[in-house]
Structure formats: C-alpha cells, structure tokens
Amino acid sequence: MARLIAGPTTIEAAGNKPKLVEESVGRVNSQTADLSIARMKSPGGWVEPGQTPDFDEYTVVLAGTLRVETKTETLDVAAGQAVLAPKGEWVRYSSPDDGGAEYIAVCLPAFSPETVHRDE
C-alpha cells in the first residue's frame, strides 16, 4: 500500500556550522530502516568530522559544491554530479565555497547515529 509522507523532519547535524538536514525517508521521519533519503543544505565553510559508516551513501548535488575526502583522494562534486561513498571506508564531507551546497543523500541501510561511526 502506498503511504504519503507529508513532509520531512529536521534533524540536528554534526559539523562546525549549522547544517540543515531534512529527512523525508528514514529512521526518524518514516520509521524506515532499509534506507534514508534527506535533503541537506550546508553553509560555506562547513565541515563535519570524518566517519566510517556501516552504510553506502549516494549523494546528488543540486547546487554549489560538496567536497568529499577519502583516505586516498579529494573529490569536489558540483551541481548535477553525484558521488558514492561505500560503507566501511573513511569519508569526510564539507562545503568549501562561499555559497555552500545543497544536496540529496541516500543511505542504504538508513543513516543512524549508531552506525555512522564519526571520528572523535
């Protein structure tokens, strides 16, 4: 049976500056553990702690640039591009440009604070 999700839930985000996280599908908003879908808006200069998550994260950048750092490379993902960060690999996200970034993140299985494994 189809189920309408009336709107997202705003979730507090990690990082040095406030970032907007609007979860449409996931553990909080729809009680869905299989996957999560959230719209993110990060300000210019935002950076979050590194993480080694237990989920794959697929990200589509809608506006601005999202920087994705791994142990071996740094990718600047521009509007219209996407990136996959596989589970079990260290990654850190940031938005280096003044205008910040807006993007959609899909996590499989769903994001949770217990499975993101952020750096201390």
Image (tube, helix red, strand yellow):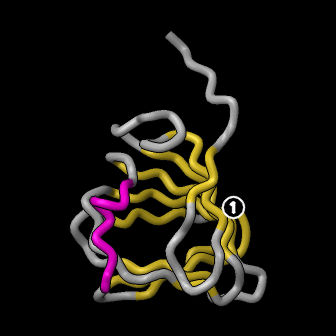
User: Residue 34 at x, y = what percent?
Assistant: 34, 38
Q: Is residue 16 magenta?
A: no
Compared to 39, does 51 lie above or below?
A: below
User: Which portion, as a residue range, is magenta?
Assistant: 112-120
Circle 1 residues within 10 Å: few <14, some 14–19, many ≥20: many
Compared to 33, does 98 lie above or below?
A: below
Q: Which residue is mark 1?
A: 62
Identify which amino acid the numbered label 1 is placed on: Leu
User: Residue 59 at x, y = what percent?
Assistant: 51, 60
User: Residue 98 at x, y = what percent?
Assistant: 76, 88
Mark 1, secondary structure of its residue: strand
Looking at the image, which residue is at 65% across and 76% down? 18
| Image-quadrant location for residue 8 | top right
Looking at the image, which residue is at 71% across and 74% down? 64
Compared to 40, does 91 lie above or below?
A: below
User: Residue 29 at x, y = what percent?
Assistant: 54, 39
Looking at the image, which residue is at 57% across and 86% down? 16
| Image-quadrant location for residue 13 | bottom right
Residue 55 horizontal side relative to residue 57, left or right: left
User: Can residue 68 be seen here?
Assistant: no
Looking at the image, which residue is at 38% across and 47% down? 110
Q: Is residue 118 magenta?
A: yes
Residue 42 horizontal side relative to residue 75, left or right: right
